[in-house]
Image: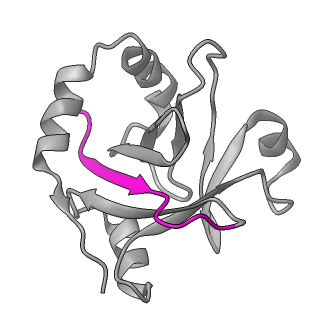
Amino acid sequence: MIITDYYKMQELKVMKSHRFDCTASTGEYPLFEAIAHRARNGRFYCYYNGIPDSFSANAQRKADKALSNGDNISSVYIPNLSSPLIGYGDVNGTNDGLLFLFSEDYKMLEIFVARGYKNNIRNLFYLFADGELDDELARIREQAKPVEGK
């Protein structure tokens, strides 16, 4: 399996910042679990916003959005204008790639982690966009367990 971890994120309350809280996950990705451990409510959470000034000029030109949590988690690239609800990125400081699937109203975000695929994430994105990973995505979703906040 290429996809190793899964996090279902939802906007639980409308805020000025676009915050997503984890409501279901496989619960095994170390960086996300460390963020959850530090969070008051015990859930992994992140913000989906524009590109921060702290990003390099090159990253600011290329990325469409960013996932952050105080620090950068990932740039978000949306390469296909005809499918703006899917994207890709990589976990800052690791060799891990990310695939993103947004709901039509942008109230839900699914994050699929491909450990070790940072350098191949764009090719993996095209498989994702073409539906060639659908069976694998369905299997990883089935492994997810609900995440209850404190």
Inspect this view and state whether residue 88 appears. Answer: yes
Taking the image as shown, residue 4 lies to the left or right of residue 73, namely left
Q: Nearer the viewer, residue 103 or 52?
A: 103
Residue 6 is a magenta residue: yes
Q: Residue at x 45, y 28 (%)?
A: 120
Q: Nearer the viewer, residue 131 or 4?
A: 131
Q: Nearer the viewer, residue 5 or 8?
A: 8
Q: Nearer the viewer, residue 94 or 15?
A: 15
Q: Residue at x 32, y 68 (%)?
A: 30
Q: Residue at x 26, y 49 (%)?
A: 5
Quadrant location, the C terminus: bottom left
Q: Position of residue 90 (x, y in %)?
A: 52, 45
Q: Residue at x 33, y 53 (%)?
A: 7
The magenta stretch is 1-15
Vertical side of 69 occupied by 111: above or below: above
Inspect this view and state whether residue 1 appears. Answer: no
Q: Position of residue 105 (x, y in %)?
A: 55, 38
Vertical side of 86 occupied by 110: above or below: below
Q: How is the image coloured?
A: one colour
Quadrant location, the N terminus: top left
Number of disc labels? 0
- Which quadrant holds residue 138? top left
Vertical side of 140 occupied by 150: above or below: below
- Which quadrant holds residue 34? bottom left
Magenta span dominant secondary structure? loop
Q: Position of residue 68 (x, y in %)?
A: 61, 63
Q: Position of residue 110 (x, y in %)?
A: 39, 44
- Which quadrant holds residue 17? bottom right
Taking the image as shown, residue 32 lies to the left or right of residue 91, namely left
Residue 14 is a magenta residue: yes
